[in-house]
């Protein structure tokens, strides 16, 4: 058998992707409609009252990267966690573990499908945003690379969450009670530099601040933090998730019991 079984990875990837399209109303349309409401309320209603915009950028355009990241973080985590949790819930995980499928094929299948769904949503949201605001992407190649990196990182994180969870309720704990609040408090709708001390220092302890500002830099060339700090922290998070998944498969934690 080859070191990497591409056919096995493709089979898992295809099944996971088809599952998303079977529930398109929930997995695709709902996030797009929610984001559109944010554009209407914050971009049009509130942004129309802000003369000069935010950091020299029209307020409606300023919130585009933050809203995009809000969707990517939530959807990447939720899709990957649900994708691996269901085989555990139904017992099909034992068939996967006994099959000639390695860790690489499993990750490419489950994590790759979750990341792909997030990228599809990101593309739809960017197209939807053009209906509400005029925005530009100064560094489109960097923007694509950063979105890919964040999608992959949080799909891996969601994969870990799906293995850790032992109930459907726990699947929603982290996305709803941790990621979403951190994203709202991470500069999605405002510049962190606007905050007075000590709240600015407190906000800088929020890791999502660096993700939002990293993506915002790729759009407009300016951000509240260095792009290299944002990139470094994202890569470190990705490496930590890969290391933890390697440990899980090596020990069988939550997979074989």
Image (cartoon, rainbow, N blue to C red):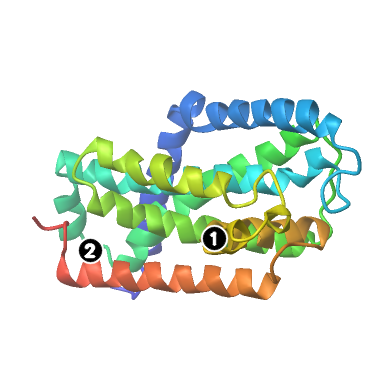
Quarter of the figure that contains the N terminus: bottom left
Which of discs 2 and 1 lies nearer the camera? The answer is: 1
Toward the right, the furthest residue is 52
Label 2 vs 1, first from the N-terminus: 2
Residue at (77% x, 30% y) in the render: 46
Label 2 – label 1 distance at C-alpha: 48 Å
Q: Is residue 112 left or right of residue 193?
A: left
Q: Is residue 253 left or right of residue 118?
A: left
Query: Measured along the vertical axis of the image, is residue 151 above or below residue 135?
Result: below
Q: Which residue is mark 2?
A: 100
Toward the front, the furthest residue is 197
Residue at (72% x, 58% y) in the render: 193
Q: Position of residue 82 (x, y in %)?
A: 33, 42
Residue at (79% x, 38% y) in the render: 60
Q: Secondary structure at mark 1?
A: helix
Q: Residues within 10 Å of mark 1 (few under 14, many from 20)?
A: few
Quarter of the figure that contains the C terminus: bottom left
Confirm whether residue 169 shows in the render: yes
Q: Which residue is mark 1?
A: 202
Q: Secondary structure at mark 2?
A: loop
Q: Nearer the viewer, residue 145 or 4?
A: 145
Q: Is residue 239 left or right of residue 53?
A: left
Q: Is residue 199 left or right of residue 42?
A: left
Q: Nearer the viewer, residue 87 or 155?
A: 155
Residue at (57% x, 48% y) in the render: 185
Q: How many numbered circles are shown?
A: 2
């Amino acid at each position: 058998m080859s070191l990497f079984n591409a056919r096995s990875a493709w089979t898992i990837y295809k099944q996971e992707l088809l599952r998303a399209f079977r529930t398109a109303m929930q997995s695709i349309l709902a996030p797009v409609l929610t984001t559109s409401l944010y554009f209407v309320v914050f971009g049009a209603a509130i942004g129309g009252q802000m003369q000069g915009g935010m950091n020299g950028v029209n307020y409606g355009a300023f919130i585009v990267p933050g809203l995009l990241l809000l969707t990517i973080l939530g959807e990447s985590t939720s899709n990957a966690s649900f994708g691996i949790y269901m085989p555990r819930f139904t017992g099909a995980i034992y068939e996967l573990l006994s099959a000639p499928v390695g860790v690489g094929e499993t990750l490419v299948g489950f994590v790759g499908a979750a990341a792909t769904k997030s990228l599809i949503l990101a593309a739809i949201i960017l197209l939807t945003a053009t209906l509400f605001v005029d925005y530009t992407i100064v560094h489109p190649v960097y923007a694509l690379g950063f979105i890919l990196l964040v999608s992959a990182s949080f799909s891996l994180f969601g994969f870990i969450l799906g293995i850790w969870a032992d109930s459907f309720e726990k699947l929603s704990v982290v996305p709803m009670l941790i990621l979403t609040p951190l994203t709202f408090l991470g500069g999605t709708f405002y510049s962190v530099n606007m905050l007075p001390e000590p709240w600015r220092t407190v906000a800088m302890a929020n890791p999502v601040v660096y993700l939002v500002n990293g993506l915002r830099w790729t759009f407009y060339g300016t951000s509240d933090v260095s792009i290299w700090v944002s990139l470094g922290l994202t890569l470190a998070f990705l490496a930590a998730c890969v290391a933890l998944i390697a440990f899980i498969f090596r020990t069988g934690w939550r997979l074989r019991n």
